[in-house]
Image (cartoon, rainbow, N blue to C red):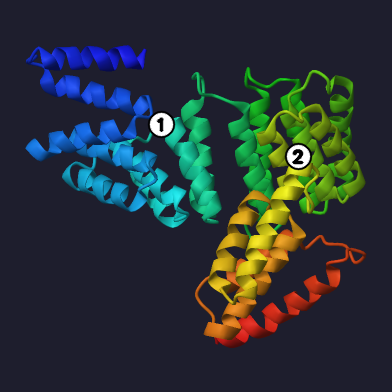
Amino acid sequence: DYAAAEKRCQERLDDNTSYRSACLQIQAEMNLRLLNFTRAEEIYTSVLAERPVLWAKLGLGKTQVAKKEYEKAEKSLIEVISADKRIVEAHDLLADSYNKRGDTIKAQKAMQDAVEISPKSVFRLRRLATVAKLNDDTEVCLDANRLVIKTARNSYHESPEDYFVLARELTDLTSEQGETTSAFAKETFEVLQRLEKRPCFDTGAKVQANSLKSRSLVNQNKLAEAEIYLDKAKEIYEDKKDLLSPEAGLELAQTLIAKGDKDGANKLLQELVEKFSGDESFVGRIDAMTDTPISQAGCEKVAKITKNGIDSYDKKKFTEAIGIFTNAISIFPSHIGLNLNLIQAVISEVKENGAQPGFEKVCRKSLERISSIQIDNPQYERYQYLRKQVDELIFTHSS
C-alpha cells in the first residue's frame, strides 16, 4: 500500500522524527512507485540542496529515467558512479537510459560494469547477453549466456529457456563458414544434452531441443541426420500441441524455415497466430520470424514504419531514414522490404556524404538476413541490384 506508506512518512516528518533521512528516502520511493514523478523529484532535489547524499542522487537519476529525461539521468547516474562505483543500481539505470535512446554500445558497457560488481546476478547476465546480441558482440553474448546457465543451475532462476537461448546462438553460428563452426556445432549438442538431464526438461522442451539439433545439422548440410531430429520434433508436437507452450511451436517453425519448408512453417505460424491472437507480444514475435508479417497488426505496423522511412528518404534525410529502418529491423529482422530499404538509404547516404565506419557491415548484415529470398519473389530483382550496388559502391568509397 504505497499511498499509505507515503502518508505515514509525511506524518513522521511532521512530528520532526529523528529518522528524517530514512522517511524522506521511503517517501520519495513511494512516490516513484505511485508514478508521482514530480513529487519524487522535489524530494530528491530538496535533500540534495542540503547535502550531496548518494541515495538522493541515485533516486533523482531513477526519476529522470522514468520521465524520459535521459541526458539529465545519465549526468546524475555518472556522478553517483564516480562517487561510488559499487552502487550497482546506478549502472543498471545507466544501461536503461542508454538503451531507451538507442545507444546499445554504451548500454553494453554499463551492463558489463554492473556484472563486474554483481557477477552472480542471473538477471544482469541475461541483460548483458541481450544487449551484446544487439551489438553483434558474439563473444560477450556467448560468455554471458554460458554464465547464466552456470549461475542459475539448481536455483529458482534455472530455466530451460536459458539453455535454448545459448543453443540458438551457437546454432546460428554454425551457418557461418570458419574454423570454429564445428566447435559451435559440438557445443550446441552438449548444451542440449545437459538440459535433457535437468528437472525442467519437459515435453515442450523435447520439441525445442530436437528442433534445434535439426537446425544445427541443416546448417552443417547434414540433411539426413537433420531430418531424423525434425521428424521427432514434429511427431511430439502433433501429438501434444494442445498441451504445449507456444514456444515449442515457434522453435519448430524456425527449423522448418531453415530447412526451406516455408509452406509448412507458415501453416504452423498461422495456427499459432489464431490460437494466441490475444497475446500481442507473442504474435509480434511470430511476425518477426517471417519475411512478411502474418498478423493484421504486424502488417499495419510495417506499413506505417515504411511510410515514415520513405518520407525521410524522399526529403533526402538519409541518416534519419537509416535510423527508422534500423529500428524497424530490430522488430522485424526478416522483413525483406525493410532490409532492402535500409540498404538503399545507406547507399544514398554514401553517395551524398561518403562512407562511414559500419556502413558496409550494416548492408552485409541485411543482405544476409534475406539471403534465402526466392527468385519468384517480387523483390528479388531489387535485391540483386542492391547487392551489386553494395559490392561496387561501398568498397569504392571505403578504399
Residue 371 image offset from top left, x and y in percent: 77, 63
Residue visible at 54% across and 71% down in the picture? 319
Question: Which of the two discs, 1 and 2, sits closer to the camera?
Answer: 1
Residue 132 image offset from top left, x and y in percent: 50, 50
Q: CA distance from mark 1 to mark 2?
A: 29 Å
Can the viewer see residue 289 in this picture? Answer: no
Residue visible at 63% across and 46% down in the picture? 169
Q: Where is residue 119, by image quadrant?
A: top left
The image's mark for residue 213 is 2
Residue visible at 37% across and 41% down in the picture? 67
Residue 342 image offset from top left, x and y in percent: 65, 67
Residue visible at 48% across and 50% down in the picture? 140
For disc 1, the marked residue is: 121
What amino acid does circle 2 point to? Lys
Residue 106 image offset from top left, x and y in percent: 39, 55
- The secondary element bearing badge 2 is classed as helix
Q: Is residue 277 left or right of residue 131?
A: right
What amino acid does circle 1 point to? Ser
